[in-house]
């Protein structure tokens, strides 16, 4: 068994695609019309045949309240591995990304949390130096 897909619920697929590709650096893997929405996935450029992140519409009635509750409590909906959290934080801040938690050592890892502009908090993590 292995992870093939994981979803992030987004409030606007076009805005999410721009953020996750142009800002975070993922690549579009699938973009297929599905009625009013799209089957829209991105992948890491380092692993284009690896797990896909589905930029899934938050159209279900429970989705937006759930997302808002996570954000209110400061809980990220997902976490992405990076080589160096401080370096990635600095790169993203220069691109205008808002962080809700700066790089912070938390035991064996360093984490930071950003706002994905689509209603979610996303954690970055890397082994502590």
Image (cartoon, helix red, strand yellow):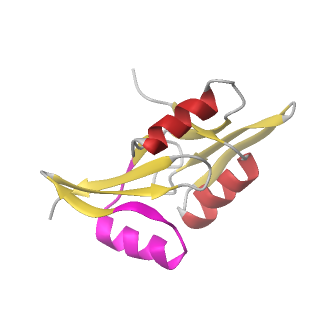
**What's the residue at 49%, 66% (across, down)?**
98
Q: Residue furthest bottom?
A: 94
Is residue 66 visible from the viewing direction of this image? Answer: yes
Q: Is residue 92 inside the magenta stretch? A: yes
Q: Quadrant of the C terminus?
A: bottom left
Whole-percent x, y for residue 48 in the image: 53, 49
Give the number of callouts. 0
Q: Is residue 96 inside the magenta stretch? A: yes
Describe residue 53's horizontal placement relative to residue 60 as left or right: left
Q: Quadrant of residue 33?
A: top right
Whole-percent x, y for residue 41 in the image: 64, 42
Q: Quadrant of residue 89?
A: bottom left
Describe residue 100's horizontal placement relative to residue 61 as left or right: left
Magenta highlight range: 80-101
Whole-percent x, y for residue 45 in the image: 52, 57
**18 or 65: which is nearer to us?**
65
Q: Quadrant of the N terminus?
A: top left
Above or below residue 82? Residue 64 is above
Is residue 77 visible from the viewing direction of this image? Answer: no
**What's the residue at 23%, 61% (across, down)?**
104
Q: Residue furthest top?
A: 1
Whole-percent x, y for residue 62 in the image: 62, 24
Describe residue 37's horizontal placement relative to residue 71 as left or right: right
Describe residue 25's horizontal placement relative to residue 89 as left or right: right
């Amino acid at each position: 068994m292995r992870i093939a897909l994981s979803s992030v619920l987004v409030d606007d697929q076009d805005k999410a695609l721009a953020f996750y590709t142009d800002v975070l650096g993922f690549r579009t893997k699938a973009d297929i019309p599905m009625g009013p929405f799209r089957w829209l996935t991105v992948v890491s450029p380092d692993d284009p045949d690896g797990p896909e992140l589905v930029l899934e519409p938050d159209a279900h009635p429970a989705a937006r309240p759930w997302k808002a509750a996570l954000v209110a409590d400061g809980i990220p909906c997902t976490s992405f591995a990076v080589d160096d959290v401080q370096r990635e934080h600095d790169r993203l801040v220069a691109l205008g990304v808002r962080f809700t938690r700066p790089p912070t050592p938390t035991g064996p890892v360093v984490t930071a949390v950003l706002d994905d502009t689509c209603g979610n908090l996303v954690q970055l993590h890397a082994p502590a130096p």
